[in-house]
Amino acid sequence: MRIGILGLGRIGSFHAETLFGLDAVESLVVTDPFADAAERAAQRFGAEVAPSPRALLASGVDGIVVAAATDAHPALIRAGVEAGVPVFCEKPVARTMREGVELLDVVRDGGVPVQIGYHRRFDAGFAAARAAVRAGELGALHTVRSTTLDPEPPPAAYIAASGGIFRDCSVHDFDSIRWVTGREVAEVYAVGGNRGAGHIAAAGDADTAGALLTLDDGTVAVVSNSRHNRRGYDVRLELHGFADSLAVGLDDRLPLRSAEPGAGFPSGTPHAFFMDRFAAAYRAELAAFTEVVAGTRPSPCTVRDALEAGWIAEACTLSLREHRPVTLAEVRSA
């Protein structure tokens, strides 16, 4: 099949390399506002360069991968759907929930599959945890703990456009909790602070945050995030049930050191970057998209899925600002 890539920054270039290595992909068409980026991809992967997204969609592509700036996501998803071309788009769907909800209506009416990039759904550990929950191995859950700690803060330009730590970082935890447990979030209470990077505080954002989520069956989920974890990139999910407990990310590359005398675990080199920790998941995610394009599977992460995680982020942002619990029903009706 012939796949178009719109946006060739860090993640777009990574996706181009991944797609180039998939047997199902015969050729690539690329476009980027910076001509040099598109030319580099053309030389490296033998891709055809399109002068614009419109030209790319008219070039006979079977599917498109949107890795452009967030502001461009809604228009590019809409253009793909209107052209009848399946779309893969990195999160978020849109900068605001209102714009995302409007786009959801377009996608529903268009009948064209759209897959949103929540790569943890394709990580072997997260998938195994979901299977264990579905199989009843843990019994009824009572506590979930989800952690995402970055090694260092993103630059000021990224923070200014990120939408805040809950919309940019925690949203992956929110999606994972929904996907693994199969439950929805009913209420949140969020806290945050800034004791590190001055440019994050200047942007009105927190560099460290926590959220207490109450799921619709009463399960308590605790989410912990920070932009400062010098030991490495730390992503974990703990599931505690009445019959058993299970953890994702508890391997030899865990970026923690034990205070217990004689303990040798973990002994491996910690993950330093999200594309290192989730390289296999990103490959599996795009392989799944080729199946969506081929019509052999439905979208494994729909626009609606992405918006559900977004509503949780909205509730946490409001909770942090107003220092109070916030229900999901409240932010949906705002």
Image: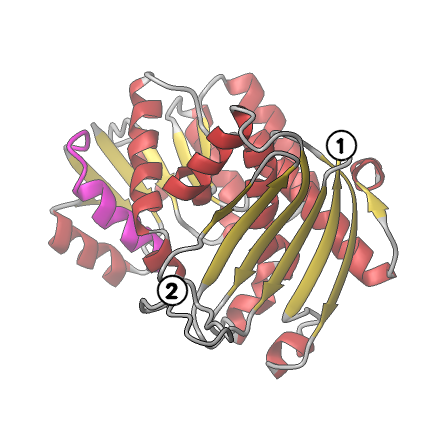
Residue 148, image quadrant = bottom right
Position of residue 55 relative to residue 158, above or below, is above
The residue drawn where x is 51% and y is 19% is: 110
The image shows residue 222 at horizontal and vertical percentages of 68, 52
The residue drawn where x is 75% and y is 30% is: 217
Helix, strand or loop at label 1? It is loop
Q: Which residues are magenta?
A: 9-25
Position of residue 22 relative to residue 264, above or below, is above
Marks 2 and 1, Cα distance to the nearest angstrom?
33 Å
| Coloring scheme used | secondary structure
Q: Which residue is mark 1?
A: 216
The image shows residue 258 at horizontal and vertical percentages of 48, 72
Asked if the residues shown at circle 2 and circle 1 are in contact, with their CB atoms under 8 angstroms apart, the answer is no
Circle number at residue 273:
2
96 sits to left or right of 186 = left
The image shows residue 23 at horizontal and vertical percentages of 15, 32
Q: Is residue 18 magenta?
A: yes
Q: Amino acid at mark 1?
A: Asp
The residue sitting at the front extreme is 262
Q: Earlier in the sequence, mark 2 or mark 1?
A: 1
The image shows residue 329 at horizontal and vertical percentages of 82, 35
Q: Amino acid at mark 2?
A: Phe
Q: Is residue 4 magenta?
A: no
Residue 295, image quadrant = top left
The quadrant of the picture occupied by the C terminus is: top right
Circle number at residue 18:
none
Residue neighbourhood size for the residue with mark 2, other residues' Cα within 10 Å, grouped as few (<14), some (14–19), many (≥20): some
The residue drawn where x is 66% and y is 73% is: 203
Q: Is residue 236 visible?
A: yes
User: For this rendering, which residue is in front, 47 or 192?
Assistant: 192
Residue neighbourhood size for the residue with mark 1, other residues' Cα within 10 Å, grouped as few (<14), some (14–19), many (≥20): few
